[in-house]
Image (tube, rainbow, N blue to C red):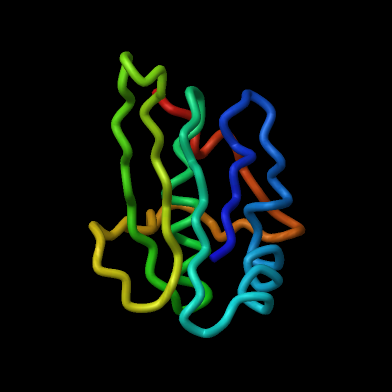
Amino acid sequence: MLALDAFSGDSIPVHLLTREAFQIYFRHLKPEGLLAVHVSNRYLDLAPVVAKLAAALGKTAAQVVSPGEEKAQTLLATWILVGSNLEFPRVAARDDLRLWTDDYSNLFQVLKR
């Protein structure tokens, strides 16, 4: 398992959410390996970006939400799991969203409204 947790701020490292980056991640994972991407963000909806990347690699994207607890002082967190044959609620890739690569990304398309 490899976890990416770099996207909660207002300035995200887009280069970590490209086809080329995901290819590198999966080169370092076993075939049954799992990539967990923390997509909680106040301004951007990154789940469709990760779903599009998963589909491009022939993988499945599934969403897991952990609720926040005031008593435990934890916040709600949304994770997208990317792997093969996942049995969690699936995340659909948006048809209007172009695949992010090292040469292309568009934050305006994923701004929350």
Residue with the most extreme bottom position:
31
| Left or right for 104, reference 37 | right
Give the total number of marks visible in the rendering.
Answer: 0
Q: Position of residue 101 (x, y in %)?
A: 68, 60
| Left or right for 106, reference 68 | right
| Residue 88 figure quarter | bottom left
| Left or right for 47, reference 14 | left
Q: Position of residue 9 (x, y in %)?
A: 62, 26
Picture layout, residue 31 above or below residue 15: below
Picture layout, residue 113 above or below residue 33: above
**What residue is rendered at 59% in x and 43% in y?**
5
Q: Quadrant of the N terminus?
A: bottom right
Q: Position of residue 61 (x, y in %)?
A: 38, 62
| Left or right for 112, reference 104 | left
**What residue is rendered at 46% in x and 34% in y?**
40
**What residue is rendered at 32% in x and 49% in y?**
64
Picture layout, residue 18 above or below residue 87: above
Q: Quadrant of the C terminus?
A: top left
| Residue 3 figure quarter | bottom right
Q: Position of residue 22 (x, y in %)?
A: 63, 66
**What residue is rendered at 50% in x and 24% in y?**
43
Q: Residue 73 or 59: which is nearer the viewer?
A: 73
